[in-house]
Image: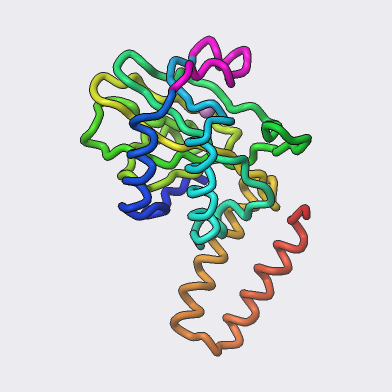
Amino acid sequence: MLLTIPGVLTAEQVATCRDRLDRADWHDGRLTAGHQSARVKANLQLPEHDPVARELSDLVLRALERSPDFLAAALPRHVYPPLFNRYVPGMAFGAHVDNAIRQVPGTAHRVRTDVSATLFLSTPDEYDGGELVVEDTYGTHSVKLAAGDMVLYPATSLHQVMPVTRGARVAAFFWTQSLVKDDGERSLLFDLDMAIREIGQAAPDSPTTVRLTACYHNLLRRWAEV
Ligand code: NI
């Protein structure tokens, strides 16, 4: 399931991020790439220990905790601290799949990457190119969102960032280990959750709402790993 979530960050939070990031100390993004992806990766990243990266990573994590759509869609068990990248003309990231397991820097903690996320921090009119192109079973999706909006997609997906030909594309990206590893099961739970929200607003006291809610929790109980 590919899902866009608008307004994960407010305009003020985006402005804070951009103020810090536009003056940050960017490094070659290949430093954190695996063997295959290093061959197709050409971008800039903030080192994970960079104070700006840590401050903004915390800002994004706090915003995620307040995003009902992120919580419902990703069913997060662990969130890898968000990283930041920047593409200027001539930069791109060719087709790749993200590493399955990532170790959180400075800890023994490992995160299985079930859900990939990109949170856009540049407005679409600031740059040309730079679309995130994700392949899934329903075809190819080209994603370029407003600043503060986020896309989630299964980390099993082949994806790429198209070449930037003007301006700068700045984004946060991260991975989530979900309580529900399987994308199909997670998508069903999300659809059911959304339907229950709708029916719950129309008929909050209906026995049907109660029964569907029970189904949701009993499926989650069946599928979740905690
Ligand atoms: Ni990737």
Q: Nearer the viewer, residue 127 or 218?
A: 127
**Is there any visible trace of residue 136 in the rendered image?**
no
Residue at (62, 48) in percent of width and height: 184
Q: Quadrant of residue 156?
A: top right
**Which residue lies most toward the front here?**
51
**Which residue lies most toward the top here?**
39
Residue at (63, 75) in percent of width and height: 213
Residue 69 pos. (x, y %)? 49, 59
**Which residue lies most toward the left here?**
125
Query: Where the C terminus falls, by quadrant?
Result: bottom right
Residue 199, compared with residue 115, is above or below; it is below
Residue at (46, 80) in percent of width and height: 201
Q: Nearer the viewer, residue 112 or 169?
A: 169
Residue 187, compared with residue 85, is above or below; it is below
Residue 106 pos. (x, y %)? 71, 32
Q: Quadrant of residue 202?
A: bottom left
